Structure formats: C-alpha cells, structure tokens
Image (cartoon, helix red, strand yellow):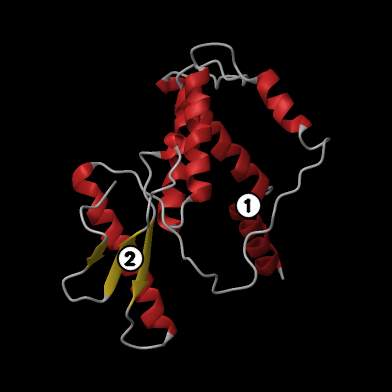
C-alpha cells in the first residue's frame, strides 16, 4: 500500500512513519512499499517498550484494514543477540520432504492436508502466541474432522458405531476398569473381617 504522504504520524505524534524512496524499485516489486517507523516513548522501562511495540502492531492493523492491504512488519533493530536458530537440515533430513511428497494423497482429499499444512506454517510464523494457537488448532481439527468423515488421508478410518454399540462399549470399558481397580469385592472382605472379629 502506498500512503499519500511521505511522512505520517499518529494524532498525538508519538509514532512516525516514513515512506522509503522507491526510485530504484524492481518491476517485480512495484506493488510493494517499505516504511520506516520510529516511536517516542514516555519512559524507558520494559513495559513502556512493550506497550509501544504493541501500539505499532495495532496501528498497522487499522491502517491496512479498510483497504484490504497485506503487510508484514518487524523490529528494525534486534533487542537480543540470540533468536531462533538457523535450521540446517542435512541431505538425509531432506529425504523427509521426499517421503511426504510420495505419501501425499493423490485425491481430492489432498486439499484438506495441504490446507492443514498451510495453517500450521501460519502458526509457526505468527508473532502472536494466541494466533499461533488458533492456527495449530485449525490445522489439527481440520484433518481430524476430515478423517472422521471418511477422507482418504492414508490413515485407517475410525469405525463408526451405532448408539447401542457405543453404549455397550462404554459399559464394557467401565466394567474392565472396575475389575482392574477392585479385584476383590470390598463388601465381602468387610463381611469376612466382621465375622472374624465376632468369633474372636
């Protein structure tokens, strides 16, 4: 999105956005614009910095929303030396990708798995932990629901049981757990103990 002015600021003037020159912009990136922001902080505490950074994210959200503009922003200067490690897969590790591609379903159900992978990747790159959780949840839930509905995703479909069969299965599980925890009838044991005391 190309803002009309070279310099933009919030009404209170604490956040400033400068539109970087695009004289040498490549033809392939003619629809991309880069902006540089700087922020006036009221204090120098960690809370002030976090609040300021959160304000940038909120402003960019509102700025792009009415126009349906896609955006991506990050902190210009690193605040820590570390960060996510660089992944260095070996040639053997890359065989995992080959294995996934070979096992990928060649049916219409492949769209379900492809969408789930896309949601998972969105969660990985998200800077908001809540958004990441939602993306991961959607990825897992969409695959689970598709399998339950009979999609061919290379897995055995769970057997669909009738209501009577489900009830019988539940009762059998409860009975098995009861028999495991209570190998002997506590009432019989109690009666034997009472009888022994009486005879004594």
Residue 67: image x %, image y %? 21, 43
Is 184 left, or right, of 146 in this rendering? right
Vertical side of 100 occupied by 183: above or below: below
Residue 164: image x %, image y %? 43, 21
Most foreground residue, 173 or 147: 147
Quarter of the view holding residue 180: top right
Indicate which disc, 1 or 2, sits on the residue closer to the N terminus.
2
Residue positioned most to the front: 23
Residue assigned mark 1: 188
Mark 2, secondary structure of its residue: helix
Vertical side of 45 occupied by 179: above or below: above
Residue assigned mark 2: 56
Q: Please rate how many residues cluster around mark 1, counting C-alpha atoms within 10 Å: few if below 14, some from 14 to 19, many from 20.
A: few
Give how far apart the Cα atoms at labels 1 and 2 are: 72 Å
Tag of residue 4:
none
Most foreground residue, 111 or 144: 111
Is 161 left, or right, of 7 in this rendering? right
Residue positioned most to the top: 107
Q: Residue at x 47, y 26 (%)?
A: 166
* Dot 1 and dot 2 residues touching (CB under 8 Å): no
Residue 142: image x %, image y %? 45, 31
Residue 147: image x %, image y %? 51, 23
Mark 1, secondary structure of its residue: helix
Q: Please rate how many residues cluster around mark 2, counting C-alpha atoms within 10 Å: few if below 14, some from 14 to 19, many from 20.
A: some
Tell me if residue 182 can be seen: no
């Amino acid at each position: 999105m190309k803002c009309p002015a070279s310099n933009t600021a919030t009404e209170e003037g604490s956040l400033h956005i400068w539109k970087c020159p695009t004289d040498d912009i490549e033809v392939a990136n003619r629809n991309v614009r880069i902006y540089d922001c700087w922020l006036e902080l009221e204090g120098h505490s960690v809370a002030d910095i976090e609040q300021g950074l959160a304000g940038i994210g909120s402003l960019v959200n509102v700025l792009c929303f009415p126009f349906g503009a896609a955006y991506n922003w990050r902190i210009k200067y690193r605040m820590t030396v570390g960060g996510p490690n660089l992944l260095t897969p070996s040639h053997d590790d890359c065989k995992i990708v080959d294995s996934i591609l070979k096992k990928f379903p060649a049916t219409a159900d492949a769209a379900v798995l492809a969408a789930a992978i896309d949601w998972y990747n969105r969660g990985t790159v998200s800077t908001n932990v809540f958004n990441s959780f939602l993306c991961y949840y959607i990825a897992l839930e969409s695959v689970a629901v598709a399998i339950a509905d009979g999609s061919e995703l290379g897995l055995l479909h769970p057997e669909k049981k009738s209501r009577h069969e489900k009830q019988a299965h539940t009762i059998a599980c409860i009975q098995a757990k009861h028999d495991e925890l209570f190998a002997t009838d506590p009432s019989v044991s109690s009666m034997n103990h009472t009888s022994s005391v009486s005879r004594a």
